Structure formats: C-alpha cells, structure tokens
Image (cartoon, rainbow, N blue to C red):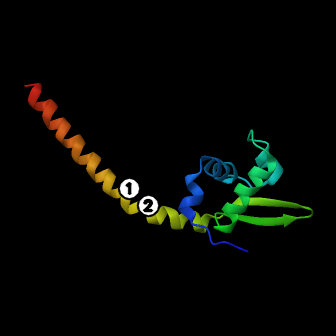
Amino acid sequence: MNLRRDVFQAIADPTRRAILLLVATQAMTAGAIAANFDTARPTVSKHLQILTECELLAQEQSGREIFYSINLEKMKEIADFIEPFRQIWDERFNKLEAILKQYQAKNNT
C-alpha cells in the first residue's frame, strides 16, 4: 500500500532534513547516506522511503545501485509556499529595527 505522505511531516524530522542536506549537492546511495548516521541502515531506509514517497527525493538506478538525489521541483514548491511567511517576518523585523534605531537616536541626544 502506497501512502500519500505530507511533505511538511516529512521535513519535520531532523534526520530527514539532514538527508536532504546530504543529497542536495550530489546523488548518493542508501549505504553512503546511512554511513553519515549513527542509526541502523533499515532506519535510514525508512527515512529514504518517506522522502521518496512525498517526492522530495528522486531515485535513479545505475546497475545494481540506486542513487538518491534531491527533487528540486518539489523543493521549489516548498520554498514557494514558505516565501509569503518569510516576507511577513522580514517586514516585521525591518519595522522592529526602525523602532530600535529611533529609540537609540532619541536616547543618544
């Protein structure tokens, strides 16, 4: 049974975020990915399965090995979703910075 997984649940896990960072620059095999963690290989395989099911990772077979790479299109969807929130916080921090500068200028006179 192929469960449809939520992307944000997938990236909520720190190990899965670490896996995404690992494969962000180069495709890697499950064994190479697992070598970077102090957990059992089946645990890493489960994380890879979840990331693949929600399409954050793509699989490509080369001979007997399967290489995992980041799916940039799916990552862009996440970035596009998060962008409005980033803009809101940027605006709030800019307003706070302006208020602090006014406060400092008033106290320095």
Label 1, on which residue?
A: 86
Does residue 61 lie above or below 20 as drawn?
below
| Secondary structure state at the residue bearing disc 1 | helix
Position of residue 67 relative to residue 104, above or below, is below
Rendered location of residue 52, percent (x, y): 70, 65
Looking at the image, the residue that sits furthest to the front is 1
Q: Which residue is mark 2?
A: 82
Residue 16, percent across and down?
A: 64, 52
Residue at horizontal 75 percent and vertical 38 percent from the top? 38
Asked which quadrant contains residue 88, the reply is bottom left
Q: SS at mark 2?
A: helix
Instruction: Give the Cα separation between the discs numbered 2 and 1.
Output: 6 Å
Seen at 18% across and 36% down, the residue is 101
Location of residue 90 in the rendering, given as x and y in whole percent from the top left corner: 32, 51
Image spot of residue 17 (x, y percent): 61, 50
Amino acid type shown at disc 2: Ile
Q: Quadrant of the N terminus?
A: bottom right
Q: Disc 2, disc 1: CB below 8 Å?
A: yes
Question: Which of the two residues, 79 or 17, is positioned nearer the viewer here?
Answer: 17
Residue drawn at the location 61% of the way across and 64% of the way down? 72
Question: How many numbered circles are shown?
Answer: 2
Furthest residue in direction bottom, as rendered: 1
Task: Tell me which corner region of the image, top left, top right, bottom left or bottom right, holds residue 60.
Answer: bottom right
Please name whichever residue, 36 or 49, is drawn nearer the observer in this view of the structure. Answer: 49
The tag on residue 97 is: none
Q: Please name the residue shown 17% across and 41% down the image.
A: 99
